Amino acid sequence: MPLDLTRSLAALFDTQLTWQDFVLEGVRLGDNAQAIPLDKIKGTTMEPFPAGVTSMTYQQGKAYYQLAGKQHEYLLADRINSVYQHDGWVHLTGGARFRIRNSRVVEFRLDEQLLAPLRTIPLTQIEHRFGQADKKVIWEEPVDALYTTTTFIYAARQLRITYEDDEQTINGVNIGASLNADY
């Protein structure tokens, strides 16, 4: 029986569980994008621009694009449709995020309120809580090194935990595809 992370994050601490054991908002990795609860979607990212658009901006939860010298709102319904057809991310109220590729859910991200119970786990306790990481990647902001993150990678579980060293908080937990593509 899959464990819904929106109901209990404790399953993430069980090192025997992998990406196949998790659901988020009732959605599993590999599900069709249409399985995502449409009424909970509050935004999108990484969706392609409409044809002919050269730039897009986000203001107060809305997206706008420039076309022929005029600004147009990129309606949420159109952005969702674009993600479902051409890939990107959908963001739900509460902090669940889903990455879509080829009309399929390939990654989850826990963020915002959903991540709150995990956010304050200290850096020194991450492996104690989540298990021994297969790999740790430390990234420093290339210009002045004022911003540093430590990423804990659990390959078999397809789990990635990103810790913001400067803020001393976990800033995201990802499960799924980008683990293989980015690391």
Image: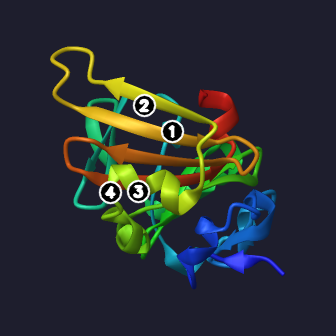
Asked whether the residues under the numbered discs 2 and 3 touch, taking CB atoms below 8 Å apart as contact, a structural biologist would say no
Front residue of 4 and 121? 121
Residue occupying the point 63% across, 73% down: 11
First reached walking from the N terminus: tag 2 or tag 3: 2
- Does dot 3 land on a helix, a strand or a loop? helix
Asked whether the residues under the numbered discs 3 and 4 touch, taking CB atoms below 8 Å apart as contact, a structural biologist would say yes
Cα–Cα gap, marks 3 and 4: 5 Å
Give the quarter of the figure containing the N terminus.
bottom right
Mark 1 lies on residue = 50
Q: Please identify the quarter of the rendering in which residue 66 is found.
A: top left
Cα–Cα gap, marks 2 and 3: 46 Å
Mark 4 lies on residue = 122
Residue occupying the point 71% across, 78% down: 3
Identify residue type, mark 1: Pro
Mark 3 lies on residue = 125
The furthest residue to the right? 1
The furthest residue to the bottom? 7
Would you say residue 22 is visible in this rendering? yes
Q: Is 105 placed left or right of 127 in the picture?
A: right
Identify residue type, mark 2: Val
Q: Residue 52: horizontal and vertical position, in percent? A: 47, 28
Look at discs 2 and 3 and give the one toward the viewer.
Answer: 3
First reached walking from the N terminus: tag 2 or tag 4: 2
Asked whether the residues under the numbered discs 1 and 2 touch, taking CB atoms below 8 Å apart as contact, a structural biologist would say yes
Mark 2 lies on residue = 53
Q: Residue 31: horizontal and vertical position, in percent? A: 80, 63
